[in-house]
Image (cartoon, rainbow, N blue to C red):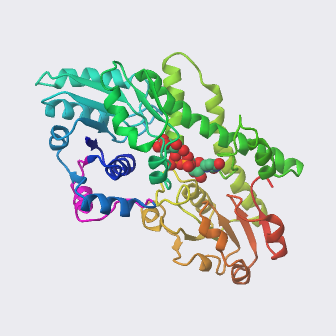
Amino acid sequence: MRLALIGTGYVGLVTGACFAEVGHHVICVDNDPAKIKLLQEGGIPIYEPGLKELVERNVAAGRLSFTTRTEAGVQASDVVFIAVPTPPLPDGSVDLSFIEKVAREIASAMTSYKIVVDKSTVPVKTGDKVAETIKRYCKAKVEFDVVSNPEFLREGFAVEDLMHPDRVVIGVKSPRPVNTMKQVYAPFNAPIIVTDINSAELIKHASNSFLALKISYINAISVICEATGANVQEVANGMGMDERIGRRFLDASLGFGGSCFPKDLSAFIKIAEQVGYEFGLLKEVQKINTVQMERFVKKIADTLWVLKDKKIGVLGLAFKQNTDDVRMSPAIDLCQRLQKEGALLRVHDPKAMEKAQAVLKDVTYVGDMNAVADGCDALVVATEWDEFKKLDLARCREAMTHPILFDGRNLFDPVEMEKLGFIYKSIGR
Ligand code: UGA
């Protein structure tokens, strides 16, 4: 099939590459000429495991190309996916101006029937607005269908999630686009659920909010564990064996971050408010997440007594492992809170140092994770990178003024750490 992706960010680029991988002909469009030039020259603007190889292979096979011209993408394709950002506005609601602009651009470029698919995360009822806009701005007055097809990929695992989705959600108003959409997704062998557009849009916000709720729930449990001497990982394991609950997203941490959960929670609370429902449950999810970070900083401050002029090594800057994304990263938030108290930071991340430099100033960026601890009063794990489990702990211990490790991701075993001579404090254990 011939597909266009308008917006070549995380979702657009990875989705485009995966669609090409299964045999579709894909044009990725973006209005950022620098990004398109980079892609055309074989560069990749983000770090995502497996993506570079996928893009190279499909460009070489002639199934994947890049352009800044929306018109070219629309006219060459049967199905046009909208995958542009939907950033938050100051009041927590969603800025839909990119969606509206792209809808107008698609409308003016349409000269024959098109299926216009919204893949961006949008508030319920956005599909109606997109349809209205296309109708208004389509001079050729051709027929079209708007479809909602939310994306569930996780950063750091995007290719894997896209190639093996748990489910594909297709929200439609009429039956006409259903078969084509099923053909687009047939090679992925995933269960397909066809719904109305509003339900499809809601599935996305409801899913992300539920996952955030799961994390806040286990983080709340971690507080009880700390107060009672229980172990949150054992509690999560025991809970997770109940199939109705499931073990995933029950890893207690210093809090969730990223460009999705915090934004989608605020948006969903706002959407609920607009239809007359106060979503107190989700407000509590946000509150627990903030308190979790405050508790972690307090744990560090209580142990070190005074933070001013203390040298602290921070491992991890990305908002999670396997990505260079530092947007709304709890690790960056933590660094800035420690800096505010006067701490001097040595920091490292396997992939995110370059992007972190734009937002995190006046710290020492250290290339080797084992050298972060040098001369430090404490070491902090802020991101759940697997690499950190291979840290040379004996070397770190010797290089520190005091071997104190705060583990915001429960990567190490408390008993082993004590044996190694560390004062070790983690989450809920
Ligand atoms: C999230 C969802 O998981 C995806 O399904 C969704 O498609 C995506 O948002 C989106 O809307 O685009 P993502 O933000 O990439 O994906 O990352 P997650 O793996 O969900 O992690 C989010 C945050 O939660 C990270 O800071 C992570 O460290 C934290 N987390 C995750 C925990 O603290 N504990 C856990 O058990 C799991």
For the question of whether residue 257 can be seen, the reply is no
**Front residue of 312 and 272:** 272
Q: Quadrant of residue 82?
A: top left
Magenta range is 26-48
Residue 425 horizontal/vertical position (percent): 77, 62
**Front residue of 354 and 7:** 7
Residue 314 horizontal/vertical position (percent): 61, 67
Q: Is residue 236 left or right of residue 379?
A: right
20 versus 339 height, above or below:
above
84 part of magenta stretch: no
Q: Quadrant of residue 296?
A: bottom right
Residue 331 horizontal/vertical position (percent): 58, 58
Residue 106 horizontal/vertical position (percent): 20, 34
As drawn, the residue found furthest toward the top would be 276
28 part of magenta stretch: yes
**Front residue of 238 and 205:** 238
Number of labelled discs?
0
